[in-house]
Image (cartoon, rainbow, N blue to C red):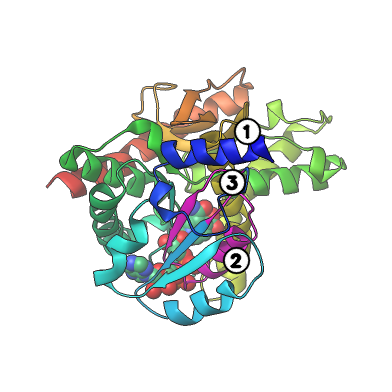
Amino acid sequence: MRTSMLRSIKSLTTSPSAHILRRGYASEAVPLRKVTVLGAAGGIGQPLSLLMKLNPLVSNLALYDIANTPGVAADISHINTRSEVVGYASDAELGKALEGADVVIIPAGVPRKPGMTRDDLFNINAGIVKGLCEAIAKHCPKALVNMISNPVNSTVPIAAEIFKKAGTYDPKRLFGVTTLDVVRAKTFYAGKAMVPVAEVNVPVVGGHAGITILPLFSQATPKANLSDEELTALTKRTQDGGTEVVEAKAGKGSATLSMAYAGAIFADACLKGLNGVPDVIECSFVQSTVTELPFFASRVRLGKNGVEEVLGLGPLSDYEKEGLEKLKPELLSSIEKGIKFATQ
Ligand SMILES: NC(=O)C1=CN([C@@H]2O[C@H](COP(=O)(O)OP(=O)(O)OC[C@H]3O[C@@H](n4cnc5c(N)ncnc54)[C@H](O)[C@@H]3O)[C@@H](O)[C@H]2O)C=CC1
Ligand SMILES: O=C([O-])CC(=O)C(=O)O
């Protein structure tokens, strides 16, 4: 009891969320952590907010959207778990939603319809992300930002430029969420290799659109003897996973439930890193020197300041080496498009 009290007091003096202490939390051993979801009432936002409400590492959950937030926040707030939930419904309240946040998750923006690429979302989502990142720079410049809004290959560079303009950019704190690619690669591999899905690990590198998504099945564990044809088919299915859902939903949006699951896994990893849990590793699209591209998804070790280490690619098969070279021009052009938008 005494130790846990001391730990709580320490967290109160060191956590950027110290001022959000609420009666009742002072005796808890887990540090206070505020998570803000921007776009909380959307297809991803709602189930993701639910999953964050179930996460015991969260003490304050701020739900922000430009529509329908009060209902979602009231609904989720009745769940009897640790975090206090507050809904914020208008631009005027965005600052309060962000103040003191340790992690900000951004699933705000429009999703694809059949026939569209993720890049077709650029015109609308770039502006949304820009506005939200300006507010982050102002109200919680030290937060870890988990960017879900598409096209991730461009929205992450946009966020970086907005933070640079504001003088708050810290590459260790900005993440493009590519966890859904890993989730899919694991599921599809387990099905083909006939291994227990819970034991599967597959790194997915590159970016988050079409051929820029490069699963490294040669490094997948448990090992399986899959043919070249099977590996090609698995790679293609992982790259087209988003489109598979868009087509199945037939105009009613893109992946929301699996994305909420993936987003919750990634945010949980960020919180664990902040709390000092060792060896927290997830794939993410971050500022990188792993290749010549300025941003690249690869395995990242998370720590108390966000990115602790960007891990290298490891040994690639010839097929993966070819895929890596093929993806670079497209990924670079999406990165440059984001930078141009934010700097013009
Ligand atoms: N990174 C990834 O792996 C994935 C990314 N996505 C992307 O996530 C985004 C959201 O998808 P859905 O939730 O299905 O869309 P949705 O349309 O269901 O929800 C988006 C929400 O954002 C809100 N919003 C719009 N402008 C806003 C603003 N300025 N501030 C706050 N909220 C705002 C809307 O009111 C809406 O509630 C899309 O861009 C989609 O492409 C989707 C799946 C996977
Ligand atoms: O495909 C989409 O538009 C949404 C997305 O990013 C995914 O499901 O991977």
Where is residue 238? Give x, y as percent: 62, 47
Numbered badge on residue 203: 1
- Ligand 1 within 8 A of label 1's CB? no
Q: Which of 137 and 96 lies nearest the eye of the viewer? A: 96
Residue under the image location 74 percent in, 48 percent down = 187
CB atoms at circles 1 and 2 under 8 Å apart? no
**Which residue position is annotated with label 2?**
50
**Which residue position is annotated with label 3?**
268
Residue under the image location 52 percent in, 71 percent down = 43
Residue under the image location 83 percent in, 31 percent down = 224
**Residue 163 falls in image quadrant:** top left
Residues rendered magenta in the picture:
30-59
Q: Measure the C-alpha gap from mark 1 to mark 2.
A: 27 Å
Q: Is residue 48 magenta?
A: yes
- Disc nearest the viewer among 1 and 2: 2
Identity, as a three-letter code, of the amino acid under mark 3: Asp
